[in-house]
Amino acid sequence: MPGDDDNKIDRGDFIEFKLDQLESTLSDSFEKLSIKMDYIVDKVNKGDIAQENIKTRLTATESSVKHLKKNCDTLEKDMTNIKVSLAEKLGWTTLGGTVGGILTKYLG
């Protein structure tokens, strides 16, 4: 039967055509997927770089804060020493003035 051979060829051509379409579609899909994956990897890398920059700045800021706290503690100690010294001097001055006033009153 001559029609059967033509039908088999048509089916073979049809199957080959469909397989070519499938291959083309898969190739396009893989290309799009590859582009999207490259985009995501690029975003992740940029995020990692930004995170590393933030981490570096945070470390520097923490170091600065530690230095400022140390300076603040030193200044508080110095202020306390100045207050004590001033109080001692005022105390001796007051005591000296009182003793001098008493001596002046009784001797004068």
Image (spheres, rainbow, N blue to C red):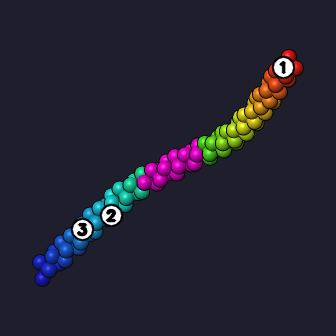
Most foreground residue, 87 or 105 = 105
**Disc 2 versus disc 1: nearer the observer:** 1
Crowd rating for badge 3 (residues with CA inside 10 Å; few <14, some 14–19, many 20+):
few
Crowd rating for badge 1 (residues with CA inside 10 Å; few <14, some 14–19, many 20+):
few
Q: Is residue 91 left or right of residue 8?
A: right
**In this view, 7 is above or below 43:** below
Name which residue type carries label 1. Thr
Instruction: Tell me, yes or no, whether the highlighted magenta stretch contains residue 75.
Output: no
Residue occupying the point 66% across, 42% down: 69
**In this view, 68 is above or below 98:** below
Question: Looking at the image, is mark 3 or mark 2 earlier in the sequence?
Answer: 3
Residue occupying the point 18% across, 72% down: 10
Numbered range of the magenta stretch: 40-58
Residue occupying the point 55% across, 46% down: 54
**In this view, 97 is above or below 68:** above
**Percent of width and height locating residue 43:** 45, 50
Q: Distance of mark 2 from mark 1, alpha carbons?
A: 114 Å
Q: Distance of mark 3 from mark 2, alpha carbons?
A: 12 Å
**Percent of width and height locating residue 80:** 72, 37
**Disc 3 versus disc 2: nearer the observer:** 2
Q: Is residue 33 left or right of residue 7?
A: right
The C terminus: image quadrant: top right
Q: Which mark is residue 104?
A: 1
Crowd rating for badge 2 (residues with CA inside 10 Å; few <14, some 14–19, many 20+):
few
Q: Which mark is residue 26?
A: 2
Q: Distance of mark 1 from mark 3, alpha carbons?
A: 125 Å
**Which residue in the structure is indicated by mark 3?**
18
**In this view, 62 is above or below 29:** above
Most foreground residue, 21 or 101 = 101
Name which residue type carries label 2. Leu
